[in-house]
Amino acid sequence: MKTVTLHNKTFDIYITSDEISDIVNSIANQINNSGIKDPLFIAVMNGAFLFASDIMRKITIPNTEISFIKLSSYSGTQTTGKVSELIGIEGNISGRNIVVLEDIVDTGITLDKIITLLKKENVADIKIATLLFKPDAYTKDIHIDFIGKSIPNDFVVGYGLDYDELGRNLPHIYKLKD
Ligand code: IMP
Ligand code: MG
């Protein structure tokens, strides 16, 4: 499908599933070669669920674990500027080497919140991997270790990303038609 309509908006195809799998493979290779030991991946729900499931199959580091947190900040096509923690960190993660898996980093407010939560748990190390990054919207100084693709300030859906909960199941990524 070249275009999709979700709620009242139309989106054009932007990143195909083939391109997404190349990007995911490239991030997985970088993580595999980064020297991280016994990583605990933390995927940020809901948006990162497909990214996390695809990338985890490519991770070959011994003693790899994965866990999930659930945060929410978007309403419609805009950030509310406030992040709510819907499901928090489970169990004792102190001393762990964390790799955060994000679908997209936009303003960075969500990322900032995650880093604050992780630091409270006294983790040993935090690395960030994101499928997509919007550098023009980013307001934080937090270094992002693994970036799949940097994109302009467009609203995108598909492959886990939603517009008011619709579009997460699309295999390709689409952007809002202007
Ligand atoms: P941030 O806190 O502004 O960096 O936004 C991060 C979160 O907002 C992401 O994890 C997404 O869930 C959501 N988000 C940001 N940009 C988009 C977009 O273009 N489409 C869908 N969701 C987005
Ligand atoms: Mg998200």
Image: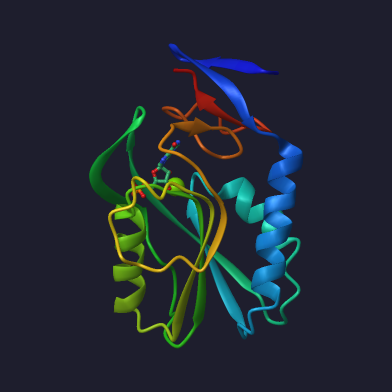
Image-quarter location of ligand 1? top left
Q: Position of residue 133 (x, y in %)?
A: 47, 50
Residue at horizontal 29%, vertical 60%?
Answer: 140
Vertical arrangement, residue 119 with respect to residue 72, above or below: below
Left or right of 79 on screen, residue 98: right
Residue at horizontal 50%, vertical 75%?
Answer: 98
Q: Position of residue 107 (x, y in %)?
A: 32, 49
Residue at horizontal 35%, vertical 63%?
Answer: 114
Q: Nearer the viewer, residue 40 or 157?
A: 157
Residue at horizontal 52%, vertical 37%?
Answer: 161
Q: Quadrant of residue 91?
A: bottom left
Q: Quadrant of residue 13?
A: top right
Vertical arrangement, residue 26 with respect to residue 78, above or below: below
Vertical arrangement, residue 34 with respect to residue 75, above or below: below
Left or right of 147 on screen, residue 91: left
Q: Quadrant of the N terminus?
A: top right
Q: Position of residue 106 (x, y in %)?
A: 38, 47
